[in-house]
Structures are given as C-alpha cells and as structure tokens.
C-alpha cells in the first residue's frame, strides 16, 4: 500500500477496486475536507499500460459532462524509486450497472434501463464529439446513481477516432463490436454496438454473445443473431426490441448514426412510438418469401442473413427463417430417406438403417423413417403394408400428397404388385390434380379480388372473395392453411372496408336528411378521395350539391325579404352578417354586407355631423346634413322630428340674434343720450317681442326716466 498521504494532500482511506492498469482508492482531500476517489497506476514496467493510463486521464480531463466522471487533479507520487501517475475523481455514491444486473435489481424496470442508457448515450456523445471512442463500454464501467442518473467511470482503453492503429484487441470480448474483435478500424459505432449488448443484458439478464471460449464468443459476435428482447422479456415492446437489434447490426454503417440519435430513439421506443419504417424492408422480405416459395431456400436465407446482420427485427423474418430451416431440414430428410430406400431396395439393410438413424436424429418422429425402419424390421410383412396404407391414407386426407405418395411407394417397395398401393397412387394423383385445380381457381379469385380492391372496387372484391370461399367449402380438403389464412385476413380487411363505406354512406345520408350539407359533403369527398369511381357517393354528392344550391337560393330570397322589411341599418348589417357566417364562401353576401356597412357608416357619420353642428349652434349646416340624410336614407327613425326641431332652433336663434341686435342698438342710443330715439326703438322691439320684460323694464323705463330728467318729453304712456 502506498503512503497514506500522497502529494501532500490526499489521505488514502481504503481500496475501492482494482483493474488491469490501476487501483482505485477512497481518499480524503485534506485541503477541502471532501472525499475523493484516486486512481493510481499499478505497474510502471509495462509501457503500453502507462500509455493507456495516460490516455485515460487526458481523455477524462478533456471532457466535462454530467454523464462522465470528471478529473479534478493529476499528479505523480514516488514509490520504491518509481514515479507513478495518479488522477483524482469525485467519490460517487452509486452502484455499477453490472451489480444491479447481477442482483436482478427491482430498479431495473424497462423505463429505468432506458433512462440509464440515455444518460450513457449523452456521455458517449460528448466523448465522440471530441474524437474519443471508449472501446470498453460494459455494465461494470457504468455507475448508476441513487437518482438513476448514470456516469461512465472508466476510459482506460480510450481510442482516438480516425486512428488507424489496430495493434491489438482492447476491451472486454463479450461486449466488443465485430470490427473490434476482428481488429479492424473502429468508430463511434463500435461503442453503440457495446451499448446494444448492455441494453440487451439489462433488459433480459442474458449476455447475447457470451460463450464458453473466446473463439466461440468471436464466432457469435460475427454470425449469431440473438432472439428479440421482447421474446425474453414481455415487458419490452417491439419498438424497443428493434432499437436494440439495430445497435447489434454486424456492420457499423447499419447502426445508429450517433449516440445522440440512439438516445432520442430509445426515448421514443420506450413510449411505444414507431421508430422504424418497416416498409423499407418490405420488398426484401417479399423477395425472400418469393425465393423460398420457388424452392430457392439458399437465396432466401442469404437475404434474411443480410437483414439480420443489418439489425432489422421483424416477426416475418423470424417466421421465414423458421420456415427455411424447416425446409432445409425437410430437404435433408427427403434425401436421407431416398438414400435409405435405395439401399433397402438393394437389400443393404444395415446401410439403410444408418440413413434412417440419421433421419431420426433430425426428426425423431419422422413417420417415413419410422415406417421404413419398421418395414425392414418386419421384413416387409403384410401388417407393415397395412400400416403404410393407413399412413398414406392419413397423409392423403391431410392433403400431404408427397407424404402420401411416399407411403404408397413404400408399400410398393415391400410388394411391387400390391393392388392397394396402385389404387392409392391413382387416387393420390387424381385428388392432387383436383386439389391443384381448386387451389388455382381460388388463387385466381383472390388475385382478381385483390386487383378490384386496389382499384377501389370494394363490392367486386367482396363478391370475388365470397365466391372463393364458396369454392373452398365445396372442396375443403384442397385447402392450404397458410393461404387460407391469407384469404381470411384479406376478406376481413375488405369486409371491414365495406362496412366502413356503408357506415360512411349512412352517416352522409343522415346528415343530408338533417340538412347538414357541409358534413354530408365532407363524408362524400373523403370517400371519393379514396374511391373516386364509387357511383353511390358520386350520386349523393350531386344530390347534396343540388340541395345546397336550392337552400342557398331560398335563403338568399329570405335574406332579401328580411332586408326589404328592415329599416334599421344595424339590424340589416346583422342579417347580412348572419348570411356570411352561414355561407362564408358566398361572394354576394360578402359584397352585400360591405355595402350595408358602408351605408350604415355613412348614415352614422352624417348624424354625428348634424348633431355636432347643432351643438355648435350651426343650425343651417345641421339642417343641410339632415336633408342629405333624408335623401339617402329617408327611413332613418325620427328624421322629420329632427329636422323640425333643428328648424325651430334655427328660427329661435334668428329671433335671439334680432333681439340682441335691438337691445344693443337701444343701449347704444342710450349711451349717446338719444333717449327719445331709444324709446322709439324699444317700442318697436316690444312690438316684435311683446311682453319682453327685460326690454320693457330695463330699457324703456330707464330711457323714459332719463328723458324726463333731461327735459325731453316722456313717452311712457306711449310705451
């Protein structure tokens, strides 16, 4: 153990772990009083180890990211005459992902595994952006915090992206990418392959490529395609399974483009959102199916192998792979059986039994092999012929004509002249011919129905399928289960579409009856966009359009009638506005609303002007405005009253002005001491304004009194 205090600052308190290059210690930073972790170089004699150790702390020092352990300090200590480098990291409280997996921790739900993986991907993205590749990503190098956040804690074999050095394998074999295992150039995609293995193990508790030997592990890395994660863990959805398999693509180009992309897709997949377009591989799967159906299992297998190597996961690939393997098995079985028959016919019974044993190793329940062995053991006994006959009849009933024919031939191998075998072969031939005819007829009907369906002729497609099932019922033994499943599936699809169309038609007709023409038209257009040749919806569309025109015409007449009867311009505007809201695309209503509003605004502006003139006492101008209003809108409420009132105010204004003028003249005469003249004007004013107390009391009396005082004659009596 090194000195308890190193670099004069860190007090070692206990060993936390040990790796290939260094030892990790728990320590106390006496300067800050905080706990830290120190990684100390273990052996300075290995220059490669020294180089890797240096690369690790330099890599960590270059990166500052919440999902990568940080380097706080770098220094050296002297021990036994050697200078050993060390670096200081924060002491993190958590558990490695490897321990959580080993303990089958309840924390490792699907959602939490994805959350941890997303954190790791973010850390990887930061490293990759700086040109660094981890090369040894595995559960023991991932520390999971108490809050389920994660940090990458070991960059001991970090690699500089773009480096061509392939001098040796570095990393843990069962978590390596194929290119890393083959010592080829590695890229950030190599870390994503390791990430896929980690995800697979965390979600299934199984290491997908781990084998007993390094050679077997390498073989698995290069060739083996593990089962879907969802097959081993029912809590994992297919989207997430596909993401994991894409990470495990054998070629780097077929994996995700970056750790960031992987993190984004993981978050979508855990929510069961679609993340891959399976249509992209549809053509290749169909090509493999076609090759398989044509008997070219080798080509079909090559296509599937390429799809699997690219990381594609699809139930159809799995099913087709099983079918191909079964076909290969069946082919080998047939070859072995034919070889056994040939040897049996030559009385080479031991050799024939060897072939039969090989068949039974492949398929312990193979009826032909069992029957041949039994036949040889019974030396072609009559009872064996009866059994072959029964077996052949069973195969014939199941429409397995090849097996039935083989059984009949076995009977002939025992007794070449057996009439039952002859009759059976003839029956097999005729039954197979009829079954083939029925199958071809059904396939033709299916093809016709499919074409009609693709052309939007749903009723025709349904009729073809019903005929297909009628033919099938007349000869049920000619059915092939796989094709029958296809027919049934297609029939359900067409029937469902037909029901959807009928439902849409009923909906459109109901809305039409309820005069919801817009809703009915929307249904028609939606269906006609999918089935433009549907006569029923075409006719209904024409009927709706005609009804819409009739309703619009009737409504237009109603609006005109209401406008004619309505005198209030605001209410007129409301009538037309309602029409615009009901028929927003009708230009005539929009134009009419514009005219009504313009007329209303003009009338309102004239009224405002007239009232403003009145308020300022400009009654002539006000009368002019009211007169304009009467000419353009004679129906304005109370316009006659308004004009009469304004005229009265104008006349009163004139009288007031005349009275004021007379009073001013009288005042002027009095100021000029022309009292007699003032009295004369006052008398005249009283004639025009009789009973005006002000003129009488103020002006006349004053003038009279002044006139008397000045010796002028008084006109009081006259006044």
Image (cartoon, grey):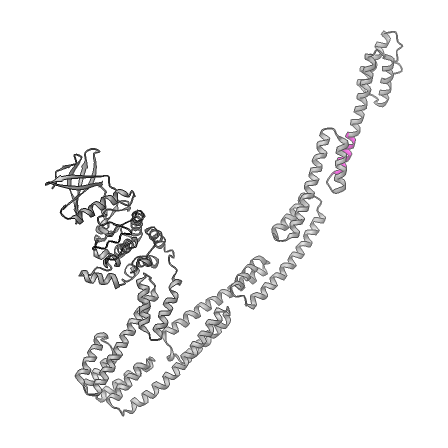
Overall secondary structure of the magenta section: helix
On the question of residue 146 being in view, the answer is yes
Residue for point 33% across, 69% down: 320
Nearer-the-camera pick, 151 or 502: 151
Relative to 128, does residue 402 appear above or below in the rendering? Answer: below
State the residue at coordinates (83%, 22%): 689
Image side of residue 177 versus residue 567, left or right: left
Q: Position of residue 335 (x, y in %)?
A: 25, 79
Location of residue 225 (image quadrant): bottom left
Whether 421 is drawn above or below 280: the answer is below
Closer to us: 684 or 143: 143
In the image, which residues are magenta?
A: 638-649
**Does the stretch in magenta take in 646?**
yes
Residue at far front of view: 164
- Foreground residue, 686 or 23? 23
Q: Visible in this render: residue 69?
A: no
Q: Quadrant of the N terminus?
A: top left
Image location (x, y in percent) of residue 506: 54, 64
**Residue 329 sits above or below residue 274 on the image:** below
Residue 585: x %, y % from top left = 61, 53
Residue 232 at x, y percent in the picture: 27, 60
Instruction: Count the marks.
Output: 0
Task: Say which quadrant the C terminus sits in.
Answer: top right
- Residue 194 among those drawn in magenta: no
Q: Residue 342 lies in what quarter of the image?
A: bottom left
The answer to which image quadrant residue 231 occupies is bottom left
On screen, residue 425 versus residue 608, left or right, reads left
């Amino acid at each position: 153990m090194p000195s308890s205090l190193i670099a004069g600052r860190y007090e070692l308190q206990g060993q936390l772990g040990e790796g290939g290059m260094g030892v990790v210690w728990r320590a106390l930073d006496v300067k800050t009083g905080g706990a830290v972790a120190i990684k100390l170089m273990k052996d300075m004699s290995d220059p490669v180890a020294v180089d890797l150790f240096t690369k690790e702390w330099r890599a960590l020092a270059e990166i500052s990211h919440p999902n990568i352990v940080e380097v706080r300090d770098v220094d050296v200590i002297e021990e036994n005459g050697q200078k050993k480098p060390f670096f200081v990291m924060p002491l993190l409280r958590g558990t490695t992902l490897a321990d959580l997996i080993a303990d089958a921790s309840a924390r490792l739900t699907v959602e939490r595994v994805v959350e941890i993986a997303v954190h790791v991907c973010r850390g990887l993205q930061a490293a990759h952006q700086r040109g660094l590749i981890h090369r040894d990503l595995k559960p023991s190098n991932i520390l999971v915090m108490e809050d389920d956040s994660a940090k990458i804690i070991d960059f001991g074999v970090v690699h500089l992206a773009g480096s061509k050095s392939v001098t040796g394998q570095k990393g843990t074999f069962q978590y390596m990418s194929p290119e890393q295992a083959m010592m080829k150039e590695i890229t950030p995609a190599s870390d994503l392959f390791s990430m896929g293995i980690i995800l697979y193990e965390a979600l299934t508790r199984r290491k997908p490529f781990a084998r007993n030997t390094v050679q077997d592990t390498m073989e698995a890395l290069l060739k083996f395609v593990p089962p879907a994660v969802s097959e081993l863990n029912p809590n994992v959805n297919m989207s997430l399974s596909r993401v994991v398999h894409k990470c495990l693509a054998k070629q780097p180009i077929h994996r995700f483009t970056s750790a960031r992309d992987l993190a984004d897709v993981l978050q979508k997949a855990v929510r069961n959102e679609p993340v891959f377009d399976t249509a992209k591989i549809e053509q290749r799967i169909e090509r493999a199916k076609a090759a398989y159906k044509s008997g070219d299992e080798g080509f079909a297998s090559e296509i599937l192998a390429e799809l699997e190597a690219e990381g594609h996961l699809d139930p159809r690939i799995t099913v087709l792979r099983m079918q191909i393997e079964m076909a290969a098995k069946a082919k080998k079985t047939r070859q072995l059986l034919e070889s056994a028959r040939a040897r049996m016919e030559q009385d080479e019974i031991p050799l024939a039994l060897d072939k039969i044993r090989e068949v039974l190793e492949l398929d312990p329940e193979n009826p032909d092999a069992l029957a041949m062995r039994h036949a040889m053991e019974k030396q072609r006994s009559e009872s064996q012929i009866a059994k072959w006959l029964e077996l052949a009849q069973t195969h014939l009933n199941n429409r397995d004509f090849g097996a039935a024919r083989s059984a009949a031939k076995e009977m002939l191998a025992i007794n070449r002249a057996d009439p039952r075998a002859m009759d059976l072969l003839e029956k097999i031939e005729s039954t197979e011919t009829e079954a083939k005819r029925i199958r071809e007829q059904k396939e033709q009907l299916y093809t016709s129905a499919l074409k009609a369906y693709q052309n939007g002729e749903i009723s025709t497609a349904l009729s073809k399928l019903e005929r297909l099932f009628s033919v099938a019922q007349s000869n049920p033994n000619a059915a092939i289960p796989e094709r029958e499943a296809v027919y049934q599936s297609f029939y359900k699809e067409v029937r469902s579409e037909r029901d959807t169309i009928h439902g849409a038609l009923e909906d459109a007709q109901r809305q039409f009856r309820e005069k919801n023409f817009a809703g009915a038209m929307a249904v028609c257009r939606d269906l006609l966009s999918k089935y433009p040749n549907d006569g029923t919806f075409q006719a209904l569309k024409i009927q709706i359009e005609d009804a819409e025109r009739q309703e619009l015409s009737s409504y237009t007449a109603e609006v005109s009638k209401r406008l004619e009867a309505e005198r209030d311009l605001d209410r007129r505007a409301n009538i037309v506005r309602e029409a615009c809201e009901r028929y927003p695309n009708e230009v005539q209503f929009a134009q009419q609303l514009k005219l009504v509003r313009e007329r209303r605004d003009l009338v309102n502006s004239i009224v405002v002007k007239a009232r403003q003139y009145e308020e300022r006492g400009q009654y002539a101008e006000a009368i002019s405005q009211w007169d304009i209003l009467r000419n353009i809108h004679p129906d304005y409420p109370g316009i006659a009253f308004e004009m009469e009132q304004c005229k009265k105010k104008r006349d009163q204004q004139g009288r007031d002005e005349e009275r004021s003028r007379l009073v001013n003249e009288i005042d002027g005469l009095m100021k000029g001491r022309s009292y007699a003249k003032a009295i004369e004007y006052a008398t005249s004013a009283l004639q025009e304004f009789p009973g005006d107390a002000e003129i009488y009391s103020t002006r006349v009396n004053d003038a009279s009194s002044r006139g008397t005082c000045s010796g002028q004659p008084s006109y009081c009596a006259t006044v």
